[in-house]
Image (cartoon, helix red, strand yellow):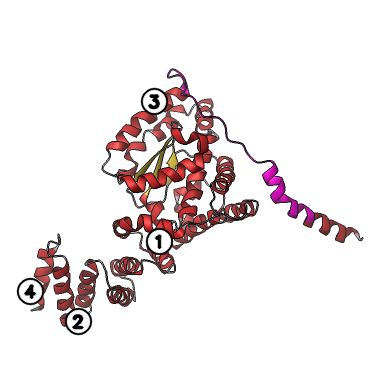
Amino acid sequence: MKRRAFIRAGCACGAALLPALTRAQEWQPPPRFTRPEVASDEGGLWAMMDREETRLRRSPFNLRDPQLRSYVQDMACRLGGEHCPDIRVHLVRTPYFNASMAPNGMMQVWSGLMLRVDNEAQLAAVLGHEIGHYLSRHSVERLRDAKSRAAFSSFIGMFGLVGALGQLGMMAGMFAYSRDHERDADRVGVMLMSKSGYNAAEASKVWANLLAETKARPGGAQENAFFATHPAQEEREATLAELARAYPGGDANEKAWQQKTAPFLREWLGDEVRRGQHEESLVLLTRALGRGSQQTEYLYARGEVYRLRGAQGDLESSLADFKAAAALGGEPPQTHRGLGLVHRARKELPDAKASFQRYLELEPQAPDALMIKTYLEELT
């Protein structure tokens, strides 16, 4: 065999062995953690997180729906294995993509993340990643590193924001893990996904979808704090895809996820529209419409984003989406409010009047009813 052919054959064999080697050298979870002494640095951190968790429980942004919380808590428990009793999931209503886990076991899952994942497996990828940080004690390593660099007070300050996260709408990066920590958490997360019966191939899709949104925003992904502390997206997608090949099989559970979150979709979409990041929202909503489920809700939301952005051609796009939502039936009453506003802006006065009247029929106690009645008087 010629040397070049021999090298090619050797590389091919190495590639074929990579999944097997990955599984053979599989990371093993540690035993459950014991609470550190209060007088220690780590014990002080745990005590601070306990106080912040109390604040979070009282926060108006805490989603207290017992069924949804139990559903996500069960997912986290399956991923965490014997650490399940120490993991406490809190759902937070804020329209940004994030989940985080403190060293005392407090996990936050934001509604903006739940809106963006297509299925249960994709949420499991993010939860597994955060549990990977927790099981690997990355926050404790960061604490020790911060102390060694005389930056202890700044590090502790980051944790003091936990209770206010919903109010501040902050992006990920609270713990500012190193990129090596992020890579470790990705690897552990994929393994936990697979062991829990999820399709690990869904993990790379989460970050690809998020990157597509941030690239659409003026300034692009470089302005997103989430990506500032994570590996380069191209590297991350390739790594996650390679890891997934070592763990084939598993379920996505898309239907179950859509059913569980359906009661909250309209509320979450409203928060997303009000977020005001129109380009990001359009990418998200167009992708969601491609799934083919709950079309009415997504069509209304996208129509509203087009209307609010008001760029060239947006009124026409908004009108088309509102009409499509109304044609499907079961549309939010605000669809007709949007139609009225678009028709009014286009000087289509009879259509505007009919739409406003329909809105008030469906939503007689609407908070903006007086304003709509004023518009109707102008159109008479």
Q: Are the residues at dot 4 and dot 3 in contact (C-beta closer than 8 Å)?
A: no
The Cα–Cα distance between marks 2 and 3, rounded to whole angstroms, is 62 Å
Mark 1 Cα within 10 Å, few/some/many (few <14, many 20+)?
A: many
Q: Earlier in the sequence, mark 1 or mark 4?
A: 1
Q: Residue at x 34, y 29 (%)?
A: 51
Amino acid at circle 3: Ala
Q: Earlier in the sequence, mark 2 or mark 4?
A: 2
Pointer 4 residue? 377
> Is residue 26 located in the magenta-colored stretch of the structure?
yes
> Which mark, residue 348?
2
Q: Is residue 60 left or right of residue 75?
A: left
Q: Is residue 70 left or right of residue 12?
A: left
Q: Are the residues at dot 3 and dot 1 in contact (C-beta closer than 8 Å)?
A: no
Q: Position of residue 280 (x, y in %)?
A: 40, 61
Residue 51 visible in the snapshot: yes
Pointer 1 residue? 280
The Cα–Cα distance between marks 1 and 4, rounded to whole angstroms, is 37 Å
Q: Residue at x 44, y 17 (%)?
A: 39
Looking at the image, which is closer to me, 93 or 370? 93
Q: Earlier in the sequence, mark 2 or mark 3?
A: 3
Amino acid at circle 2: Glu
Pointer 3 residue? 47
Looking at the image, which is closer to me, 314 or 273? 273
The Cα–Cα distance between marks 3 and 1, rounded to whole angstroms, is 38 Å
Q: Magenta stretch: give its range.
A: 13-41
Q: Secondary structure at mark 2?
A: loop
